[in-house]
Image: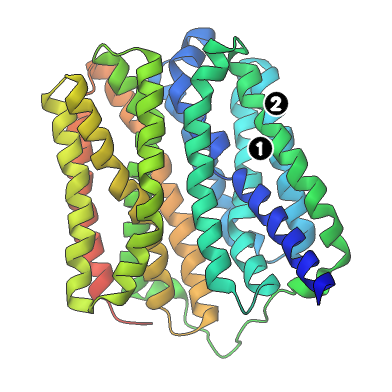
Amino acid sequence: MHSKRRIELFILLGIIFITLNLRGPITAVGPIIEIIKEHYRLSNSLAGFITTLPLLAFAIFSPIVARFRYVTMMLYGLLFIFFGEIVRSYFAESGLFVGTLIMGIGIAIANVLLPSIIKAGFPKTFGKIMSIYSLVLVISAAIGAGISVPLTLSLNLGWKNTLALWAIIAVIAIILWIPQLGGRRRYKNQKRNINEMTPIYKYATSWWITFFMGTQSLIFYSIIAWFPSILIEKGFDIHFASNMTLLYQVCSMPIALVAPIMVARIRNKHKHVLTSFLCLMYAFAFGILFFYNSLFAMLIATIFLAFPMGGMFGIALLFVSTKASHPQKVARLSGMAQSLGYLIAALGPIFLGFIYDLSHSWNIPLIVFVCLTVLLIFFGYKANNSKVI
């Protein structure tokens, strides 16, 4: 019994370190993007592409990952993350983009496989472990956003060494995961139901959930990419921008756990009210950023950004799990929503950076953000009221 408990704790530790690799290496870029732009003399469009590349990797590789052996594929994913982070930091300007893409492929692999691995390894405590997984995702994002500037400037590590430090987390995850290669039976791929032949894309429900997933991801990753730059343009220094980025990541932690639970428990006709309320907090924050420049206003806007940023992804996953009638459809719907959703999201950072290059102001991108919020409310309403498939 004690031996089994030790094995489960070891697996859980491996899952935690794998999860730490899934958001931090991406969110670490935003606070120091101005330094990277200056180093390579990048335009805002190219700088936005740094955030877009992992999303493109998510979109392309998410649907095909589950076809391979979970344990072996996870190891490959971690190796991709490790080598991608090294290439991103130390192989010149081309390495910045190539390494980011390689890292994105590895993160896409782990993104897809971790929920299935958790379900196989902890069938009786799946819900609790998924809660830990969700919390560690947010913690990873917060660490990435919070330490980049202090390490780069205060400790004089430089941006390359700062980003490369994430490779240490990848190495730890690899070391913890290698022993699982001897326990492949635990993680067998589920057999598909051959009687379920209707393509998932033929259901209207699938599309509404995909549009919701894509729009919320577009807003989320665009904020990660450009929020520090918006604050810097308003006259604040990079340290303040970094602290505000860390603040919204920390404030998003409790709502990341609470919002999906609340949506799951309240009556269906009231679910859209909560989702819309969170979306309106986005619009309120963007309005503050558009009209005001004071430190207090920036603090309020940051806090209001945190709530929908923490809650929207969990609500999107809840739509996926509650609008499909059995596990096979959940997997297929999740694959479609995440693949096409991240493809939609990939447009955000580069498109908004392009708009800034043309207008030399963040006001027009902020108006676009408000329009996207209105679309998110509409897609949330349609997804919530769509039929179970």
What amino acid does circle 2 point to?
Val
Locate residue 167, reporting x and y percent.
70, 33
Locate residue 57, reporting x and y percent.
57, 45
Mark 1 or mark 2: whose residue is earlier in sequence: 2
> For the view shown, which residue lies furthest in the left direction?
291
The answer to whether mark 1 and mark 2 are in CB contact below 8 A is: yes
Going 33% across and 24% down the picture, which residue do you hit?
354
Q: Is residue 335 left or right of residue 237?
A: right
Residue 6 in view, yes or no: yes
Say which element carries label 1.
Answer: helix
Residue at which label 1 appears: 102
What amino acid does circle 1 point to?
Ile
Give the distance between the C-alpha atoms of the residues marked 1 and 2, in whole angstroms. 9 Å
Going 51% across and 15% down the picture, which residue do you hit?
36
Location of residue 360 by image quarter = top left
In the picture, the disc for residue 117 is: none
Against 46, residue 237 (above or below) is above
Residue at which label 2 appears: 87
Locate residue 209, reporting x and y percent.
34, 65
Locate residue 240, reporting x and y percent.
35, 19
Say which element carries label 2.
Answer: helix
